[in-house]
Image (cartoon, rainbow, N blue to C red):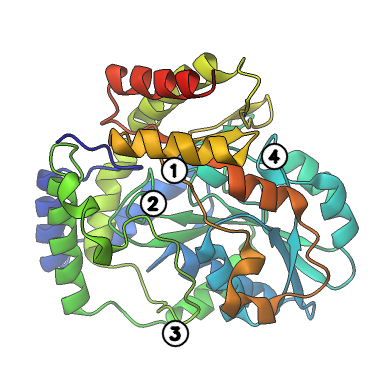
Amino acid sequence: MRTLPPTAAPVPLRSLIRALVESVGGDRSEELFRDEIKKYFKAKNVFLLSSGKGALYVALAALQQVSNRTVIIIPAYSSFCLASAAARSGLHVKLCDIDPKTLDFDLDILERLADERTLAVIPVHNHGLACNMEAIRERVSGNGVYIIEDAAQAAGATIERQKLGLAGDLGILSFGRGKNFCALGGGAIVTNDDTLASIIGNLIQKLTKPSKSSEATLCLTGTALGILLQPKRYAIPSALPFLHLGANVFDQGFKVSHLPLISAGVGRRTLAELDHENEIRIHNAFFYRNSLLSNPDLLIPSGPPEAYSVYLRFPVLFKRKEDRERILLLLTKEKLGASRSYPTPLDQIPGFRKSLIGECKIPHARWVADRILTLPTHRYVREEDRARIVQLIKEALK
């Protein structure tokens, strides 16, 4: 039976084969990939690593070499990968509540939390929905606070024609499976700050290279991904619970290394198609938005008007949490790729609580966690899929 994955970034088999050949032959894929990212994002400095959370960890380590401050501020509702990198850094963490209308920081709370102990603020463009970077800078500027922009889910999105990732002091990209900029794995730090770039470069020199076995595993993973992500086959992996598809995992013991060569080769090809893939996502997102925006039982988050969001997934908030559960069941029964997003606010992760300081007054984050549903936007979503999703939501809310 045709089954839509919640998110998908297909890697054509021909791209995988070419990347494999280049990696075996010692091709300049890594250098070329770095140069192409610099050109696309208009970044002076790009550093390639084994994952997005590894990139964030290295970015935090670099800031700890230029400041003796020990506190970072992150959104209370976000990816568990963010929590993993924050915990591994050894820094203290303050959770900032979010605004359900934007899924961005609650800016008034952010301003109160930032003080003389704050090393960095980390805005996260969740689901490809752009944060208000100008407003964030205004609230924390003058306090000596760095901004690390987590654009792991928003590659290609812009604010006033500037690519997200370069609106802060440092930017984080992710090339993981399920991201719109997929290279089977990996991540990057982008920055126009030469001082920070020099420190990051020194840190990365100490990291190990990926093993040949890990390169081989990536190749096999890529082959399986290309075959099984297609809706006519996705029912197979989705029926196997041990694969933990889409699971959010907190793991502060993750490995940090250089980017695998095969990922560089795949990434070059997916970067070339990124704008086209994003256009598909935006087209599908606008259909959902235009169809559901007027429904009084729903809240549709949006970014700042000057932003061009790319919608890795389309977030919808139900004003009653029982509606969310009922409609998720309907959409899941018809295999239409809906998902709950992150299961809880970050303060509910047992292993992460020891990193937290201050009071966790985050009522909006808890409200969102109980009510959010994300809809698929990727290239496998057909017109009839979108129409059926909207129909089921509207009928269930009558």
Hey, what amino acid is under mark 1? Lys
What number is the disc on residue 276?
Answer: none
**CB atoms of marks 4 and 3 within 8 Å:** no
- Earlier in the chain: of badge 1 and badge 3, it is 1
- Earlier in the chain: of badge 4 and badge 3, it is 4
Q: Is residue 166 visible?
A: no
Marks 2 and 4, how far apart in space? Answer: 37 Å
Task: Give the SS element for disc 1.
Answer: helix
Q: Which residue is mark 4?
A: 100
Q: Which residue is mark 1?
A: 39
Mark in front: 4 vs 3: 4
Left or right side of 106 for 352: left
Q: Which residue is mark 2?
A: 35
Q: Which residue is mark 3?
A: 206
- Earlier in the chain: of badge 3 and badge 2, it is 2
Q: Position of residue 171 (x, y in %)?
A: 57, 55
Hey, what amino acid is under mark 4? Pro
Task: Give the SS element for disc 2.
Answer: helix
Marks 3 and 2, how far apart in space? Answer: 22 Å
* Quadrant (top left, top right, bottom left, bottom right) of the C terminus: top right
**CB atoms of marks 4 and 1 within 8 Å:** no
- Earlier in the chain: of badge 4 and badge 1, it is 1
Q: In the depicted view, which residue is nearer to us: 207 or 12?
A: 12
